[in-house]
Image (cartoon, helix red, strand yellow):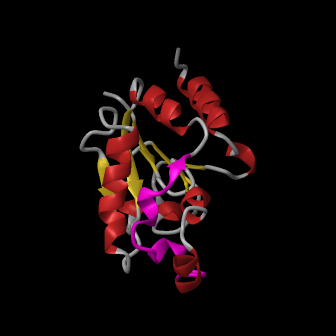
Amino acid sequence: MKKIIYVDMDNVLVDFPTGIAKLDETSLEKYKGAYDDTPGIFSLMEPVTDAIESVTFLSNHFDVYILSTAPWENSSAWSDKLLWIKKYLPQVMYKKLIISHNKHLNKGDYLIDDRLKNGADRFTGELIQFGQEKFKTWKIVIDYLVEKENLK
């Protein structure tokens, strides 16, 4: 049985600042300080460097799911995240999206997330905190998992 890995979207798979950079002046002003509430912003984001290739690699060795939180006040975020996956990972992550504000309720071996919020700090498997000192890039994450799990 394959081990389970959950991967967060925001700032792990998707580069949030690339979406902000594409907003018009009106939206930038209206949603200043709460850009994640901007309708459609999640559809504007580009992938984080090496994210697509890394998730594809992991899916060959693990049972991988996307485990993300969507802003409660931005209903388009829920569908935008699905559309993003259909655009960038259509076969690899087909029907493997979980939207939850309680990530700790999901059981698995690893959670790759950039923050400790929404239950990530209470996840019962190993939390790989992406973008932090130990796991700054996808290459470092992949190297760590290859060595730890003895992958080829």
What residue is at 61 percent from the left and 40 percent from the top? 49
Decide which of 23, 149 is in the foreground and name it. Answer: 23
Q: Residue furthest top?
A: 152
What residue is at 58 percent from the left and 76 percent from the top? 25
Q: Is residue 71 left or right of residue 50?
A: left
- Residue 112 is inside the magenta segment: no
Position of the N terminus by quadrant: top left
117 versus 4 height, above or below = below
Decide which of 119, 78 is in the foreground and name it. Answer: 78
The x, y position of residue 130, in whole percent, is 62, 49
The x, y position of residue 129, in whole percent, is 61, 52
- Which quarter of the picture shows residue 138? top right
Q: Is residue 32 left or right of residue 118?
A: right
The x, y position of residue 102, in whole percent, is 38, 67
Residue span colored magenta:
31-47
Evaluate whether residue 25 shows in this view.
yes
What residue is at 50 percent from the left and 54 percent from the top? 45
